[in-house]
């Protein structure tokens, strides 16, 4: 990442991540499709009722592990092998502690959270059974995200990509087996997801332990207060950034729950496609974060500026491509999730497609958020990105609680757009000043 054309480097690094993340989202997409087709609109709506609770927990895991790996990437860029090994060991310590704490918290708080969100009574037991199984898989989520983040810190995005392809196909097979053949219901879809991620973890771990620079010598297998503090300083705010975003989403979810099962079904289906199409944005974010951290470690400040410009161009072009998919194929894709009476399906699809059209018009703004935020994180600042999440939360809550009272349930849709606008302005002002390195 510290030599060569920034655009080519970022594309070469990002493309495997894009494809890997698409496959990762693909199996949640297939989960939802099989549940909707086999178990009905109520089961589909039950998945939707867990959407933000899943993001809260697994976004926290993903953010923290990505933050831990920023420190590793910096030492890789500086070619300090001993520091690389020490920082990996600290990341493992923090991940193990986090896995234990979050798993216990998830099991104890899942039902209370669903009740607090005013989940419809007819969906409560379905949503809880799905969430309970997913939360049992938190240690596996920690393992995969940490291993994949470490590989990316070394500049290796291909292995996470391949492992996610393997896991995605495994998940689809298990979905068919558990839901359609064994008739395990909504819990079967959750078990399939957990086992697929376990397979991805094994694939990443098998490669990482063979990398010479990642082999931790005995002398480097000790807690280091300074490194632990550095990784906590980077990881916790990045995790909390997702928690803050999820907090706003939970308010939105509680409002959406009041709009009925048809709205939840259409909204859930649209969110699955939305999640699939935003995966390229998160991949570009990983790329620019690693690129920035390595070049910062190597003292190549001018390359950082060039890299940001390249990443933004790539992101905006990609976003317009994703927008076209929503406009042209959105209705047909939404139809894959539902199998009910024609009028019920049409009503739910209408709601979901309206959401997709609004998203599509402004989609480049989301890609800019990911790229700018990740660049700032790569520069070693995880507080500003966390603060940007507060801006997003305020926008979403305002639209859910106020705008819906004025324009109806579509106010929830516009909350996404205003969240992107607010974050872009906040992050853009900071980065403009920072990259001048005055």
Image (cartoon, rainbow, N blue to C red):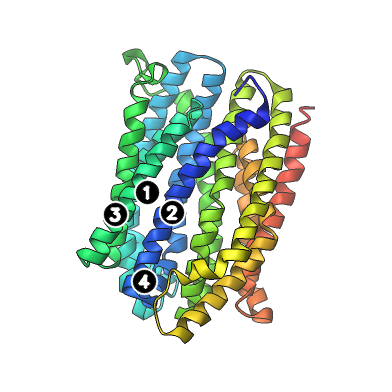
- The answer to whether the residues at label 3 and label 2 have Cβ atoms under 8 Å apart is no
Mark 1 residue element = helix
Other-residue count near label 2 (Cα within 10 Å), few / some / many at <14 / 14–19 / ≥20: many
How far apart in space, not on screen, are marks 2 and 1 (Cα)? Answer: 7 Å
* Marker disc for residue 168: 1
- The answer to whether the residues at label 3 and label 1 have Cβ atoms under 8 Å apart is no
Mark 4 and mark 2 lie on one chain; the one further toward the N terminus is 2
Mark 3 and mark 1 lie on one chain; the one further toward the N terminus is 1
How far apart in space, not on screen, are marks 3 and 2 (Cα)? Answer: 13 Å
Q: Which residue is mark 3?
A: 173
Q: Which residue is mark 2?
A: 26
Name the side, left or right, on which 299 lies relative to 117.
Answer: right
- The answer to whether the residues at label 4 and label 1 have Cβ atoms under 8 Å apart is no
* Marker disc for residue 212: none
Mark 2 residue element = helix
**Residue 436, relative to residue 221: is it above or below?**
below
Mark 3 and mark 2 lie on one chain; the one further toward the N terminus is 2
Q: Give the x, y percent position of residue 240.
A: 52, 48
Q: Give the x, y percent position of residue 255.
A: 53, 74
Residue occupying image coordinates x 65% and y 37%: 376
Mark 2 and mark 1 lie on one chain; the one further toward the N terminus is 2
Q: Nearer the viewer, residue 25 or 79?
A: 25
How far apart in space, not on screen, are marks 3 and 1 (Cα)? Answer: 9 Å
Q: Nearer the viewer, residue 98 or 276?
A: 276
Q: Which residue is mark 4?
A: 37
């Amino acid at each position: 990442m510290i030599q060569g054309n920034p655009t080519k480097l970022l594309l070469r690094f990002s493309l495997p991540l894009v494809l890997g993340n698409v496959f990762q989202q693909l199996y949640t997409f297939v989960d939802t499709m099989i549940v909707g087709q086999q178990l009905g609109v109520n089961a589909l709506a039950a998945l939707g009722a867990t959407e933000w609770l899943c993001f809260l927990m697994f976004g926290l895991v993903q953010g923290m592990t990505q933050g831990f790996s920023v420190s590793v990437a910096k030492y890789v860029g500086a070619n300090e092998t001993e520091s690389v090994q020490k920082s990996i060991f600290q990341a493992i310590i923090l991940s193990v502690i986090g896995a234990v704490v979050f798993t216990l918290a998830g099991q104890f708080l899942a039902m209370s959270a669903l009740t607090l969100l005013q989940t419809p009574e007819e969906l409560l037991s379905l949503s809880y059974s799905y969430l309970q199984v997913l939360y049992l898989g938190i240690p596996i989520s920690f393992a995969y995200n940490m291993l994949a983040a470490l590989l990316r810190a070394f500049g290796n995005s291909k292995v996470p990509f391949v492992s996610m392809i393997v896991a995605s196909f495994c998940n689809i097979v298990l979905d068919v087996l558990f839901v359609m053949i064994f008739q395990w219901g909504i819990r079967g879809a959750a078990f399939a997801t957990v086992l697929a991620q376990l397979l991805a973890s094994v694939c990443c771990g098998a490669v990482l332990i063979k990398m010479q620079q990642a082999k931790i010598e005995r002398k480097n297998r000790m807690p280091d207060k300074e490194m632990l503090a550095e990784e906590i300083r980077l990881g916790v705010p990045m995790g909390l950034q997702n928690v803050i975003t999820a907090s706003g989403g939970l308010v939105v979810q509680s409002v959406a729950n009041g709009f009925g099962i048809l709205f939840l079904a259409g909204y859930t289906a649209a969110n699955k496609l939305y999640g699939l199409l935003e995966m390229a944005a998160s991949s570009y974010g990983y790329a620019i974060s690693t690129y920035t951290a390595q070049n910062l470690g190597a003292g190549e400040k001018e390359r950082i500026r060039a890299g940001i410009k390249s990443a933004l161009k790539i992101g905006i072009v990609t976003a317009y491509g994703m927008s076209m998919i929503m406009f042209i194929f959105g209705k047909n894709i939404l139809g894959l999730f539902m199998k009910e009476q024609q009028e019920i399906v049409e009503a739910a699809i209408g709601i979901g497609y309206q959401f997709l059209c609004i998203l599509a018009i402004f989609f480049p703004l989301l890609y800019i958020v990911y790229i700018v935020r990740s660049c700032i994180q790569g520069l070693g600042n995880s507080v500003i990105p966390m603060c940007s999440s507060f801006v997003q939360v305020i926008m979403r809550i305002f639209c859910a609680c106020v705008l819906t009272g004025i324009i109806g349930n579509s106010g929830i849709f516009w909350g996404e757009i205003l969240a992107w606008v607010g974050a872009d302005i906040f992050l853009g002002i900071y980065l403009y000043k920072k990259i001048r390195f005055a």
